[in-house]
Amino acid sequence: MSLALNKEELTDYLNEVFPQIRNDFSIDELTEDSITMRLLTAERHLRPGGTVSGPSMFALADVCVYAMVLARIGRKALAVTTNCSLDFMRKPEADKDVVAHCRLLKLGRALAVGDVLMFSDGSDKPVARASMTYSIPPVHVG
Amino acid sequence: MSLALNKEELTDYLNEVFPQIRNDFSIDELTEDSITMRLLTAERHLRPGGTVSGPSMFALADVCVYAMVLARIGRKALAVTTNCSLDFMRKPEADKDVVAHCRLLKLGRALAVGDVLMFSDGSDKPVARASMTYSIPPVHVG
Amino acid sequence: MSLALNKEELTDYLNEVFPQIRNDFSIDELTEDSITMRLLTAERHLRPGGTVSGPSMFALADVCVYAMVLARIGRKALAVTTNCSLDFMRKPEADKDVVAHCRLLKLGRALAVGDVLMFSDGSDKPVARASMTYSIPPVHVG
Amino acid sequence: MSLALNKEELTDYLNEVFPQIRNDFSIDELTEDSITMRLLTAERHLRPGGTVSGPSMFALADVCVYAMVLARIGRKALAVTTNCSLDFMRKPEADKDVVAHCRLLKLGRALAVGDVLMFSDGSDKPVARASMTYSIPPVHVG
């Protein structure tokens, strides 16, 4: 139950394996069983009518659980999302970051499960809820 | 943001509208935006191999969110589940109650959303996670 | 891509491992990648107001995907549900069986996924939709 | 049960309300209760390792159900996603479009539900499955 990567190591590793999203997300806080990340909301994440797009919120939830799993198991880029469910509950504000609080609910040998609650920065009413299952490939000892 | 029914009134109302489940569930605690209920685990809830059945855990999550919504909107038995997602993470213990903590994430005019974390009584490792959406029928003013 | 168990063998095996549900469900049809089962709707499956309960529909979807997986991998009772999502779309009729059509979408070494569309017998409008993921334990060769 | 918009009208309307995605998706076929759309896979949709990103597949499923609902109810851009579930089953091929077949399962006054099966173009093994619920705002008659 300890972290394989701290916040700085995790940030570096995500930037290395996902360079295309390095300007989209940042890590606020990391503990042994939770992570808080934010979508650095920009024009490219918006939908007409001034709201954050569904795919951007999916991506935020997905990167949260992925980052949390990596923080625990270390530099293994191979974990893959197998399932997600999302509830969109309120319209996110277009000029605010979206802040996501993720709890790691299970970290098994084969499957990890996390849930995520997302808020417009500064609000305490959730805009969306997500749960994600990641499949962790077996370790091949060489 | 106040309760329309307190814990005793809610228990009475659930027993009245769902007499067939009065011996299955009880309410531990009720606040304005959360409820803790338990499945009073009995032989009829078990599966071979000594575990609580999936339908029993579905029923527990469902009654939690339903009860929470009723506690807020009052004696209206018409709210219906429109969606649920469930993650089964660990095997519940056959000789323990299943304790469910439900948070009300949204209570809109038309839709309510709650999420539920379930534990074998006495453990802090969740056995299952659920989220439920309820549709609330429009009020017809006579 | 062939069946390990035919319809009769599968029925016998389900009755053996789940004797408590043998009067609840029956198999209409089995192919290599689909199964049609029915809930033999009885008083115990109903909710006040004359509709089939959510837990009964969850159980039907769950047994469909389980049976489909067993039909392909053979007599291994150990597959466990790890995730499900359900949409409840219309009110099932209380005096009709619920007929479920399940498609096996994936049968991997570790995970199987199926989806299920449920109808009141004789209707072509779905009452509910479900998807289920089963985890298949690794085979230990002794 | 007839279409309010045909394929050309629907394409024009999507391009008008979502100009930012006009180069991402196209409609292959539209019927009264189904639509086939494709993600025109390009570099921006990929992840390291040569696969289509999760957010791109979420976006494809989302636009399918949205387009199907609009095709039936007409030029009303206000329908919003309230819930989705996704199963990722196989790795999509990086150099193929992703083709999505969507069925409209329910079109009620307040909620619409569709499910979507996605394939790498030319393959018959699904890469992902999705279901989406849309909330349809009440019509205000002026």
Image (cartoon, coloured by chain):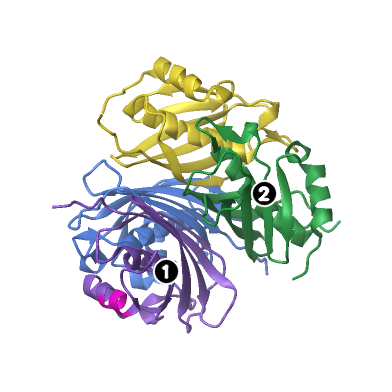
Chain colours: A blue, B yellow, C green, D purple
Whole-percent x, y for residue B118 in the image: 52, 35
Is residue D132 in view? no
Q: Name which residue type carries label 1.
A: Glu
The residue segment tinted magenta is D8-12
Side of B52 relative to B4 (left or right): right
> Which residue shows up at 77% across the image and 69% down it?
C2
Q: From the image, which quarter does the N terminus of chain D lie in?
A: bottom left
Name the disc covering residue C38, or none.
Answer: 2
In the displayed structure, A84 sits above or below C24; it is: below
Is C118 in front, or is B124?
Answer: C118
Q: Quadrant of residue D107?
A: bottom left
Dot 2: element: strand
Q: Chain of mark 1?
A: D
Magenta stretch: dominant SS? helix
Residue D10 belongs to the span the image colors magenta: yes
Give the residue at mark 1. Answer: D32
Whole-percent x, y for residue D20 in the image: 25, 74
Residue A89 belongs to the span the image colors magenta: no
